[in-house]
Image (cartoon, rainbow, N blue to C red):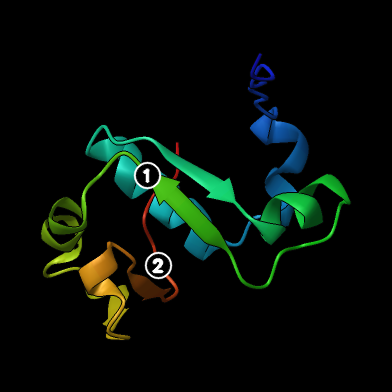
Amino acid sequence: MLPSVRHYQLDQSEYSHLFSPQLLYLFSLFHEYEYSIRIVGGAVRFVLLGVTPYDIDLATTATTNEILSMIQGDSNIELVYTRAEHFGTLTLIVGTTDRVID
């Protein structure tokens, strides 16, 4: 018998002080385009420990092509080519922004 998978969702307001404006910018962008986006990997551990993550891996329901379309023309987001794009992995650098976060 396979073990059951548990799903946990944190109250963002409890941890939002750990999130950079750049990360919040990405969250709002994906929300605007109605895609789900989640923090994954080691950054989850840091958030749970109350430490601001410095390198954040994200998982999303958006495909690579959908993400490329979303960020096209966005001067706040730089795509870094790493040759991992073929595998569905994108590296993005997000600059300072004036985008309003809901």
Q: Residue at x 12, y 67 (%)?
A: 72
Asked whether 45 or 92 is in front, the reply is 45
Depicted 79 relative to depicted 49: above or below: below
From the viewer's perspective, is 95 left or right of 52? left
**Image-based side of 76 in relation to 11, left or right:** left
Q: What number of labels is visible?
A: 2
Q: Closer to the observer: label 1 or label 2?
A: 1
Quarter of the figure with the N terminus: top right
Name the residue located 28 percent from the left edge and 66 percent from the top edge: 87
The picture places residue 79, in percent across and down from the top left corner, at: 27, 78
Q: Amino acid at mark 2?
A: Thr
- Residue toward you, 61 or 88: 88
Residue located 58% across and 64% down the image: 56
Residue for point 84% across, 60% down: 51
Identify residue type, mark 1.
Thr
Residues under numbered marks 1 and 2 in contact, where contact means CB atoms less than 8 Å apart:
no
Which part of the image, by quadrant, shows the C terminus? Answer: top left
The residue positioned farthest toward the front in the image shown:
1
Q: Residue 76, relative to residue 52: is it above or below?
A: below
Residue under label 1, please give it. Answer: 60
Q: Which residue is mark 2?
A: 97
Disc on the earlier residue, 1 or 2: 1
- C-alpha gap between disc 1 and disc 2: 21 Å
Q: Position of residue 71 (x, y in %)?
A: 20, 63
